[in-house]
Image (cartoon, rainbow, N blue to C red):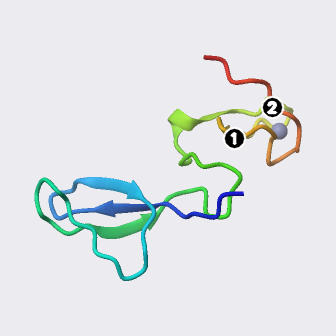
Amino acid sequence: MPDRQLYRLRSASDRELIREVDPGATYVDRETGEEFQVVGRVLPLAPSPSQLPYSVANLRLCGCSLEQLVQKDLNDCPHCARRLPAVER
Ligand SMILES: [Zn+2]
């Protein structure tokens, strides 16, 4: 299970970046030279079986009667433990 937490970083000119961060490290925008500030953690919170950020583009319905949204990189529904069908391409 991946235990890496992803963070949302933002610069003074509102450029955003999503990545893991090391405590105490400084992240600088290569193009503008501005420093990124951590503005939030990205769902799912670590540890999570999924590595995909919890966003519309990465979600699908699990297909059971609970009708829960689950990340597309999961093989089993985290809500009902049912095996998920293969993702349609
Ligand atoms: Zn389910």
SS class, disc 1: strand
Residue 8 place in picture, x, y as percent: 39, 60
Pointer 2 and pointer 1: residues touching (CB < 8 Å)? yes
The residue indicated by pointer 1 is 70
Asked where in the image residue 83 lies, by quadrant, the reply is top right
Q: Nearer the viewer, residue 20 or 61?
A: 20
Residue lying at 82% horizontally and 47% vertically, measured from the top left: 79
Q: Is mark 1 within 8 Å of ligand 1?
A: yes
Q: Amino acid at mark 2?
A: Leu
Residue lying at 40% horizontally and 55% vertically, measured from the top left: 18
Q: Is mark 2 within 8 Å of ligand 1?
A: yes
Q: Earlier along the polypeptide chain: callout 2 or callout 1?
A: 1
Q: Which mark is residue 84?
A: 2
Residue 64 place in picture, x, y as percent: 85, 32
Residue 40 place in picture, x, y as percent: 43, 66
- Left or right: 57 as drawn, with respect to 29: right
Ligand 1 is found in which quarter of the picture? top right
Q: Quadrant of the N terminus?
A: bottom right
- Left or right: 62 as drawn, with respect to 32: right
| Residue most extreme to the bottom | 24
SS class, disc 2: loop
Residue lying at 20% horizontally and 69% vertically, measured from the top left: 35
Q: Amino acid at mark 1?
A: Val
- Residue 87, relative to residue 39: is it above or below? above
- Residue 16, relative to residue 4: is it above or below? above
Residue 54 place in picture, x, y as percent: 56, 47
